[in-house]
Image (cartoon, rainbow, N blue to C red):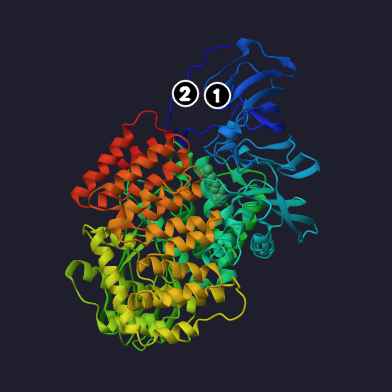
């Protein structure tokens, strides 16, 4: 064999994109499954389309045989490294055959072919296929597939349609990352769906025996998603079977493999007994998300991984639209914005900030981020607002028609909207290339019958990017009079320059409702009176802005209490009480409005305001605010809780979920007053996991000495419920005990670091669930996290890199904490043999 120089870990650049010189048009795969010695025979139909050698990807493969057109290759016709197979001087058209051996049982990275609870499964996005066989493992190489699986296991699945046991054919050309294989002892819940094109589709949800009682909601969500995509986007399903498989060990939420979606079991299995309302909502959203990928991702895929937002931003936007239709616009939008601010704004404000379409990466798995997904979805939302509903429909229709079967780019996507609407989207494209959350500074002026709003945008510097250009910001706004009557309905002004003004002839100064529905992902800065905010909270016709007004009031109170020891004033507490007791308002909305900004949200806001956040102080002030609200509501609480009862059997529908959400909030306040008496009764009476968890969290918070053991006793047998047990305890213990408890729990019999859900529950319980505990000034939280990251990095780099983002806010804090965090980041960075995943993250955070 010839020598090939091994490739170093390298930065990949968008500007270097070039098509492959030799492509693959058909893949024929044969698997003989065995845990430690699976044999994969591949026959690739190859075709030259440019000049140069053919370089295939392959990792952790033992090559057993290689031939071209039936002739075994001479040693000088090819070369391998740890990550490549190079073929020299290949003909214009040929068949490459390879045989490799792999060990799925030893694969703890959960990328490629691996085993979970005795079943074989795959995760190929982004670059896992190269751990299965030698192939051009990149999204612009699209091939049809034939797959033959040999195994004694009863259920053998792959993409496409099954012709006989274990033999699958997928007629739709697809990139490697959409390949999937599953083999195991599984049972299906089955149903069917007839598409608008008259195709009969068999729907299966495959789970381990015993779990089939918990598949109903996933199946129901799937059928509603299929119907919705036909009705709203005109997209129908295109195979005769659609399979979903639940897997216990899975790094992410789920994966849209063609015709064979593989899910983290957490996002499939649900019964009223074991899943909360939030779990049900996540299942609905993720089932929809993966199904919607069939068109936005699979039929039209990405040319390269820099275009990841092309499928993810769009598909998140689509699943958000779906959830709004299923669950109500306002509450869904508020939830999505809360998540955007908590995850994406945080990312955008720190060392990991990157554009929605990045220009370079070292490890692509590190770019499955809130920026690509959630900000990516906001960009579609803004495009929708700018071109209007009709323009949006036309643009989408053109995109589906023109690019069906393509591996496309953001430029392709935008060109469809330019052509369909006649608009120039050159400036809009800056949203894809410039990182950072813009600040929108608004000032109001009223003078002699003229009301003027001055607008200014500032796009902040981010790592590697300075001196940014203004971007088009769609600003939806309306005007109210002093009594709260709407005097101008919503209109959209697109701010394209750095500054702009709007003027109105009015006899009286109005109340401005701006950025309605959160029409752009920006930080709004607008100084104004409490009176205006209270007017909006009580009267705005835009429910998002009603909520937002309450949010700003609360945040303002917390800020003052943190920085100036201010008390919580009656005017605010009265407004909160009014909302809590407003029987005409939607319970789900009231629950959202009663939730105070999170500890991390406060840390982020203080930092933005130039104040160093003190996690202990934030924790204490938030609790004081909760106590103040509880005290103000004391007389009403029992009645309010009774009014939120949901008689009859548990129903996951949004209406009941909203009542339970409010009841849970109220129980939290009650616990501040009665030390857990009501929560104990609620725990005993709970007949569903939502109510039980709400009571459990209250009792943990109240320091009930027995409740953790009781919960464990009752739920020890259930992995998904026990994840909640691990997380809730750590999140709801006093900060000074949090690290100690987390450390203790790592020695619990049921702690299993190799299971991503369990690991995330424990680590996330501390870093996200108990920030004041994580940031304990003794530095033990940082050390604990770093120790575990170093441990997990040896087996599962992807998970490790993800969880390392808990450190990404380190520069917000005081000098002592910064030193402690930097020391841990540097200790990790100095450790030999780090994964590419973790070392890229550490590099970026330390820069
Ligand atoms: N495409 C999947 C989704 O729906 C995410 C898979 C990411 N997996 C990974 N290993 N990076 O959103
Ligand atoms: Zn996705």
Q: Residues within 10 Å of mark 1 (few under 14, many from 20)?
A: many
Choose between 375 and 511: the one closer to the eye. 375
Where residue 734 sits: x, y (%)? 31, 61
Choose between 20 and 544: the one closer to the eye. 544
Q: In this view, does 826 lie above or below 188?
A: above
Mark 2–mark 1 contact, CB under 8 Å? yes
Where residue 483 sits: x, y (%)? 36, 89
User: In the current view of this chain or complex, which residue is farthest to the right?
Assistant: 164
The residue that mark 2 highlights is 7
Q: Judge whether residue 533 can be spotted in this image.
A: no
User: In the current view of this chain or complex, which residue is farthest to the left?
Assistant: 564
Q: Judge whether residue 451 can be spotted in this image.
A: yes
Q: In this view, does 592 lie above or below 818?
A: below
Where residue 703 sits: x, y (%)? 35, 66
Choose between 514 and 56: the one closer to the eye. 56
The residue lying at 64 percent from left, 49 percent from top is 261
Query: Does ligand 1 reach within 8 Å of label 2's beta carbon?
Result: no
Q: Is residue 827 above or below residue 599?
A: above
Q: Residues within 10 Å of mark 2 (few under 14, many from 20)?
A: few
Residue 45 vs residue 637: left or right?
A: right
Where residue 777 sits: x, y (%)? 22, 52
Q: What element carries label 2?
A: loop
Count of picture labels: 2
- Classify residue 156 by image quadrant: top right
The residue that mark 1 highlights is 84
Residue 469 vs residue 397: left or right?
A: left
Real-space CA distance between mark 2 and mark 1, rounded to the nearest whole angstrom:
9 Å
Residue 45 vs residue 392: left or right?
A: right
- Classify residue 100 by image quadrant: top right
Q: Is mark 1 on a helix, strand or loop?
A: strand
């Amino acid at each position: 064999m010839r020598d090939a120089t091994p490739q170093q870990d390298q930065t990949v650049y968008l500007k270097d994109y070039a098509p492959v010189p030799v492509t693959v048009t058909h893949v024929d795969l044969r698997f003989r499954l065995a845990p430690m010695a699976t044999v994969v025979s591949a026959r690739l139909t190859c075709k030259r389309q440019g000049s140069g050698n053919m370089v295939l990807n392959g990792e952790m493969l033992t090559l057993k045989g290689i031939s071209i057109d039936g002739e075994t290759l001479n040693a000088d016709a090819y070369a391998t490294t740890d990550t490549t197979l190079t073929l020299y001087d290949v003909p214009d058209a040929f068949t490459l055959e390879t045989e490799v051996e792999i060990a799925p049982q030893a694969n703890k990275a959960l990328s490629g072919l691996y085993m979970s609870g005795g079943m074989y499964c795959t995760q190929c996005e982004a670059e896992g296929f190269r751990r299965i066989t030698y192939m051009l493992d990149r999204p612009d190489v699209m091939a049809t597939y034939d797959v033959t699986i040999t195994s004694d296991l009863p259920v053998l699945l792959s993409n496409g349609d099954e012709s006989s046991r274990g033999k699958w054919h997928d007629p739709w050309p697809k990139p490697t990352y959409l390949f999937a294989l599953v083999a195991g002892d599984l049972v299906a819940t089955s149903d069917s769906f007839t598409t608008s094109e008259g195709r009969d589709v068999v729907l299966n949800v495959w789970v381990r025996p015993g779990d089939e009682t918990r598949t109903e909601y996933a199946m129901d969500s799937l059928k509603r998603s299929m119907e919705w995509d036909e009705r709203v986007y005109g997209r129908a399903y295109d195979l005769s079977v659609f399979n979903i498989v639940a897997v216990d060990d899975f790094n992410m939420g789920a994966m849209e493999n063609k015709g064979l979606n593989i899910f983290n079991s957490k996002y499939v299995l649900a019964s009223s007994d074991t899943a909360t309302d939030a779990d049900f909502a996540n299942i609905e959203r993720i089932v929809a998300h993966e199904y919607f990928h069939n068109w936005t991702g699979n039929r039209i895929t990405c040319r390269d991984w820099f275009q990841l937002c092309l499928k993810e931003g769009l598909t998140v936007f689509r699943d958000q639209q779906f959830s709004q239709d299923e669950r109500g616009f306002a509450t869904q939008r508020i939830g999505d914005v809360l998540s955007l601010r908590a995850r994406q704004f945080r990312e955008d404000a720190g060392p990991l900030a990157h554009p929605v379409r990045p220009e370079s990466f070292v490890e692509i798995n590190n770019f499955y981020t809130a920026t690509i997904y959630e900000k990516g979805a906001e960009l579609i939302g803004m495009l929708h607002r700018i071109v209007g509903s009709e323009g949006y429909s036309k643009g989408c229709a053109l995109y589906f028609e023109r690019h069906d079967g393509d591996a496309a780019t953001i430029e392709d996507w935008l060109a469809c909207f330019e052509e369909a609407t006649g608009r120039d989207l050159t400036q809009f494209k800056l949203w894809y290339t410039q990182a950072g959350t813009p600040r929108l500074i608004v000032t109001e002026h009223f003078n002699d019958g003229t009301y003027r709003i001055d607008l200014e945008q500032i796009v902040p510097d981010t790592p590697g990017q300075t001196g940014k250009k203004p971007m088009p910001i769609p600003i939806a706004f309306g005007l109210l009079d002093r009594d709260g009557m709407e005097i101008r309905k919503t209109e959209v002004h697109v701010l394209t320059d750095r500054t702009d003004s709007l003027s109105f002839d009015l006899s009286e100064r109005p109340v401005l409702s701006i950025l309605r529905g959160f029409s752009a992902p920006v930080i709004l800065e607008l100084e104004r009176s409490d009176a205006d905010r209270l007017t909006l909270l009580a009267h705005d016709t835009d429910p998002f802005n009603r909520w937002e007004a309450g949010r700003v009031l609360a945040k303002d109170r917390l800020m003052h209490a943190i920085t100036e020891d201010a008390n919580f004033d009656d005017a605010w507490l009265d407004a909160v009480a009014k909302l809590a007791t407003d029987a005409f308002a939607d319970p789900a909305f009231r629950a959202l409005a009663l939730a105070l900004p999170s500890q991390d949200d406060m840390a982020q806001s203080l930092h933005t305001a130039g104040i160093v956040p003190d996690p202990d102080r934030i924790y204490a002030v938030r609790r004081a605010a909760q106590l103040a609200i509880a005290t103000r509501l004391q007389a009403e609480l029992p009645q309010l809780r009774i009014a939120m009862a949901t008689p009859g059997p548990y129903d996951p529908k949004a209406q009941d979920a909203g009542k339970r959400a409010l009841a849970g909030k109220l129980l939290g306040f009650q616990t501040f007053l009665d030390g857990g008496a009501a929560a104990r009764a609620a725990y005993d009476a709970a007949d569903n996991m939502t109510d039980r968890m709400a009571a459990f969290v209250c009792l943990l918070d109240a320091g009930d000495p027995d409740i953790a053991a009781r919960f464990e006793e009752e739920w020890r047998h259930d992995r998904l419920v026990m994840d909640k047990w691990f997380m809730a305890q750590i999140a709801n213990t006093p900060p000074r005990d949090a690290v100690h408890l987390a450390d203790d729990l790592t020695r619990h019999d049921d702690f299993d670091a190799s299971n991503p859900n369990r690991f995330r529950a424990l680590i996330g319980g501390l870093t996200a669930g108990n920030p004041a505990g994580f940031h304990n000034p003794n530095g033990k939280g940082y050390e604990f996290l770093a120790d575990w990251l170093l441990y997990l990095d040896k087996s599962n780099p992807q998970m490790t890199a993800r969880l390392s983002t808990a450190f990404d806010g380190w520069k917000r804090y005081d000098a002592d904490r910064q030193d402690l965090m930097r020391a841990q980041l540097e200790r990790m960075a100095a450790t030999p043999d780090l994964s590419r995943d973790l070392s890229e993250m550490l590099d970026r955070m330390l820069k």
